[in-house]
Image (cartoon, coloured by chain):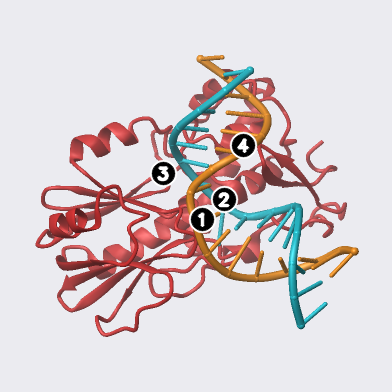
Chain colours: A red, B orange, C cyan
DNA sequence: AGCGGAACCTGTCGGC
DNA sequence: TGCCGACAGGTTCCGC
């Protein structure tokens, strides 16, 4: 499901519902997502308080008394807050019993998501490899331009590489390039300073707008309270193959870059 | 160093 | 109806 705006939406929901709660007990239904054995995971978490919840790139950080629980939802991971007497769903992978009275459910159809139990130092080491947060006040168009200058890869592929900029995924990469009028195959280092400025502004505007609309629910993304996001209503090209471009009415095209779909308007993005 | 491709999983959808 | 391949919002590993 999730790119930066969706993870931010989840983090905000979790903050409201479970920040400062204490983990009483953990039940693991499937070990695949975990970085350690189920019993180690469960025993280590029991008794720790969730002090702070925050986001870095597409990661969720649960800052506990002694550990960082680092979550990544990959394609289909979800966190849902519910009641302790809820029935076990088919894709429930981990239950966190919380005090006061709540159940935090981690569910994941495809089981590609991860829950890593780390020390603060290990988490730090892992996250420092990521590029800058595109919405950070300190992130500038000049920084983006300088980063682009270092890469000959297609700009779409560049945007997906988390070491360049953190948090953009397949939906927003296509949307950002459409809004910037840039062809997805343009080598990153061939993009002018002026075009980069436009891409920077599009990036910040689109990501912030999406957060304001609680993210994009294309198939199964849900908020912590199981509501959908609303930003799918504002997408211009993603998954719109053969539909007329909103600006020029040319049919939107799909192509494959790095084994992933890219959507674009051949007229608006020459 | 940097690239393309496969792997990790499971479900869904379209075509024949 | 049934089967099969393609595809899905992501990351990481491996070999060239």
In the foreground, A134 or C11: C11
Disc 2 marks which residue? A206
Marks 4 and 1, the one that precedes in the sequence = 1
Marks 3 and 4, the one that precedes in the sequence = 3
Marks 2 and 3, the one that precedes in the sequence = 3
Q: Separation of disc 4 and disc 1 at Cα?
A: 26 Å
Question: Going 33% across and 31% down the picture, which residue do you hit?
Answer: A128
Disc 1 marks which residue? A75
Relative to residue A33, is residue A118 drawn left or right?
left
Mark 2 and mark 3 on one chain: yes
Could you tell me residue B6's position as x and y percent? Answer: 61, 39
Q: Chain of mark 2?
A: A
Label 2: element kind: helix
Q: Quadrant of residue A233?
A: bottom right
Disc 3 marks which residue? A57
Question: Going 69% across and 25% down the picture, which residue do you hit?
Answer: A187
């Amino acid at each position: 499901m999730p790119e930066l705006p969706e993870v931010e939406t989840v983090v905000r929901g979790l903050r409201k519902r479970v920040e400062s709660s204490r983990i009483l007990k953990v039940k693991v239904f499937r070990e695949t997502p975990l970085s350690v054995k189920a019993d180690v995971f469960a025993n280590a978490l029991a008794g720790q308080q969730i002090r702070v919840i925050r986001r870095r790139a597409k990661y969720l950080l649960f800052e506990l008394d002694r550990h960082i629980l680092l979550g990544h939802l990959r394609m289909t991971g979800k966190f849902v807050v519910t009641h302790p007497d809820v029935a076990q769903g088919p894709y429930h992978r981990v239950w966190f019993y919380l005090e006061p009275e709540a159940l935090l459910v981690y569910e994941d159809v495809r089981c590609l998501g991860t829950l890593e139990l780390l020390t603060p130092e290990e988490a730090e080491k892992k996250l420092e490899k990521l590029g800058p947060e595109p919405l950070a006040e300190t992130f500038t168009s000049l920084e983006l331009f300088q980063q682009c200058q270092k890469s000959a890869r297609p700009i779409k592929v560049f945007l997906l590489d988390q070491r360049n900029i953190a948090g953009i995924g397949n939906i927003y990469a296509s949307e950002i390039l459409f809004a910037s009028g840039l062809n997805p195959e343009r080598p990153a280092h061939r993009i002018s300073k002026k075009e980069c400025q436009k891409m920077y502004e599009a990036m910040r505007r689109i990501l912030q707008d999406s957060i304001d609309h609680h993210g994009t629910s294309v198939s199964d993304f849900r908020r912590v309270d199981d509501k959908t996001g609303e930003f799918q209503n504002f997408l211009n090209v993603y998954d719109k193959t053969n539909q007329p471009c909103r600006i020029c009415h040319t049919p939107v095209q799909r192509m494959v870059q790095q084994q992933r779909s890219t959507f674009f308007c051949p007229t608006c993005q020459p």
